Image (spheres, rainbow, N blue to C red):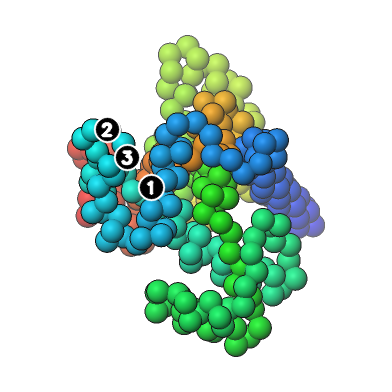
Amino acid sequence: MASTAEWLLRGSLAILVLAFCVGQCYQFVTRAYTIRLHAINEYGYIIHEFDPWFNFRAAQYLHDNGWKAFVNWFDHKVWYPLGRPVGTTIYPGMQVIAVWLTKSWLPVWFGVKKYLGMSIPKNVLVKGAKRVSKSLSSPFMSMVASSMSKVGMKWVEMSLNDVCCLIPAWFGALTTVTTGLIALECSARFHCGVGSQFGTILDEFPLLGHYLRKVGDPIRYILKKYSGLDAGGVRVSSSSALQPASLLSMTATMFFMSTIPAHIMRSVGGGYDNESVAVFAMTLVFYLWTRSLRGDGKGADVDINPSEDNVGYR
């Protein structure tokens, strides 16, 4: 009876901790997005600052003329009187993303949402998918639009200007997610208690680590005993992967990333600049790298062995 009650208690607490963290993470992602929409809600869909206007102009050229013309584009209106070979002196990732979203992803995504009766933005243009399929230059997207028309879906377009205004807010929210995943990966102990070696790094600090262990060990023990999820610092069975401490670390990281002014000022709506996409790309790379270091698992790419130099690749 006691073991059954303990099993129920541990399972219930584990579900509560997981549900709390998931709910809070969703709130923080939503907050990250809505905070960055302040300028748009206040002044409308307007590109602001100097560099974002050039970036939008470059995106407009790519949208209207295609990739081949873009990479060979020599702009005589800038760097007067010399001009500028834009195609070879620009980081085109942001423009490519904006045009891809405008021409490919968003019309299909909004069309699906409208077909399912879900809400879509008001600043969109609804067209017949069959008529659009005949005017698209991409054979694949033409096939997609034709397939949408057969099931009664509409082709829902958003202007390139509005997409460029919203990209910083979209990617600011995505950066909040990837940063939280980094915190989770670096603090959880996957694969039989080995996992990442960064989770208890503060415990090794002189003096500070002593008091952290004094305070943390009882808490870790209680969480381990009654939630069934290890809090780090002790070896556990392979059935325990996500710990309350790591989940709360992810949640706290997402909170700070969603509201930190240094990131908001580079990802505010209308600020169509490189950092709005680049920060997400960097954090995604950092997460994928730390994720690749998770060793000692079946089919793992690396084997974490303290006796080896750096990382022991298999």
Residue under the point 28% across and 58% down = 69
Answer yes or no: do the residues labelled 2 and 3 have beta carbons within 8 Å? yes
Is 165 displayed left or right of 90 in the figure?
right
Is 63 displayed left or right of 168 in the figure?
left
- Where does label 2 land, which residue? 80
- Quadrant hosting residue 301: bottom left
- Where does label 3 land, which residue? 77
- Where does label 1 land, which residue? 58
Residue under the point 55% across and 16% down = 211
Give the tally of numbered discs. Answer: 3
Is 141 displayed left or right of 303 in the figure?
right
Residue 246 shows up from this direction: no
Does dot 2 land on a helix, a strand or a loop?
A: loop
Answer yes or no: do the residues labelled 1 and 3 have beta carbons within 8 Å? no
Does dot 1 land on a helix, a strand or a loop?
A: helix
- Indicate the amino acid at tag 3: Lys
Residue 135 lies, with reference to residue 233, above or below; the image says: below
Where does residue 26 sit, x and y in percent of width and height?
A: 67, 47
Residue 82 shows up from this direction: yes
Q: The C terminus lies in which quarter of the figure?
A: bottom left
Where does residue 14 sit, x and y in percent of width and height?
A: 68, 49
- Indicate the amino acid at tag 1: Ala
Residue 29 lies, with reference to residue 150, above or below; the image says: above
Front-most of 312 and 103?
Answer: 103
Mark 2 or mark 1, which has the lower sequence index? 1
Residue under the point 42% across and 34% down = 51
Front-most of 228 and 122?
Answer: 122
